[in-house]
Image (tube, grey):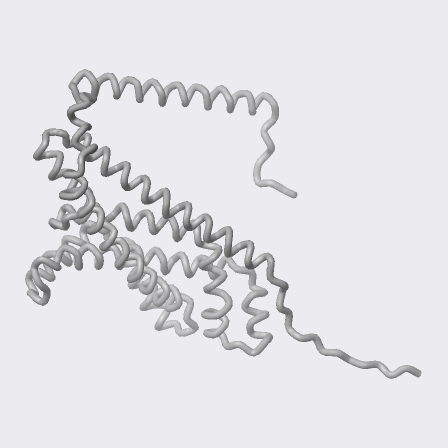
Amino acid sequence: MSTLFDVPGPVARRRMVWVNIAATVVVIGIAVWVLTRVGAKGQLDPDLWTPFLTASPWVDYLLPGLLDTLRAAGISIVTSAAFGLVFGLGRLSGSRVVRTVSGTIVEFFRAVPVLLMMIFFYLGLGQLRILDPSDVPLVAVVLGLTFYNGSVFAELVRSGVHSLPRGQREAALAIGLRDGQSLRLVEVPQALIAMLPAITSQLVVILKDTALGVIITYPDLLDSARRFGSGNGNILQSLIVAALIFIVINYGITKIADRLAGRVGRRTAGKPRVEAPSLLVATAKD
């Protein structure tokens, strides 16, 4: 099998080992230095950490903030997926007008920062007064996340379909499917499976970007941790605990996606190939 680069030899492998060892030593040294400075300022005092061993910060702050974060992320994931499928298919449409309109919308929302969209929707919806004021922050967060991440999903759909072998569409057309049916029934499902790692990464981005809602007064996990830390004089510890919660959730999402991808791959590989019926031609014996 050909490779795009030369396989490293013994000297290069030894050099890589020494570079990795040196990098590890540097990282450990920085961590020790940071812990030393933090400890010198009293931030490692057990009294600053023990409140998190009680129920009060979790029941009154962290768990309600986590629920608000998961609510905004869950809604945004569903709406982003719908947005991405619609405009991803639009970018693959046979109509030039549909492709142009879909491409313009996708590229526009990909170029606008998420926080800017959240602030725009927060101020705009507040001026229009079409929603209850208490619902405006959630709707603004969801809309900002939907338009940005939905545009990324649309680009993933488009690039995933284009990365498929041409034989997939040709086989679909050969058995009588139209272009739109081939796209919906054959190409897009395969593209989504192939792009599952990238989709998983984007789900993690959605969950993390909910923290931007603190700018528009959305009471997410980060805001709850900050409020608890400000009131108890342990804001650094509160933010570290919130970060650990985000890490655990994102790790869980990644592992679930990996297991799903493996299961889908095994199920696909285990199925026999379905081929178009061949034309049997009988020959008469003399």
- Left or right: 138 with respect to 2? left
- Left or right: 49 with respect to 87? left
Q: Which residue is drawn at 12% across and 37% down?
A: 228
Q: Where is residue 188 in the image (x, y as percent from the top left)?
A: 46, 64
**Residue 102 versus residue 139: which sits nearer the camera?**
139
Asked if 244 appears above or below 74 in the picture, the reply is above
Which image quadrant for residue 4? top right
Determine if residue 223 is in view. no
Q: In which quarter of the image is the C terminus?
A: bottom right
**Residue 20 versus residue 107: which sits nearer the camera?**
20
**Residue 115 versus residue 106: which sits nearer the camera?**
115
Asked if 19 appears above or below 87 in the picture, the reply is above
Which image quadrant for residue 223? top left
Q: Residue at x 17, y 48 (%)?
A: 64
Q: Position of residue 155 (x, y in %)?
A: 38, 58
Furthest-front residue in view?
55
Q: Position of residue 90 (x, y in %)?
A: 37, 68
Q: Residue at x 34, y 61 (%)?
A: 81
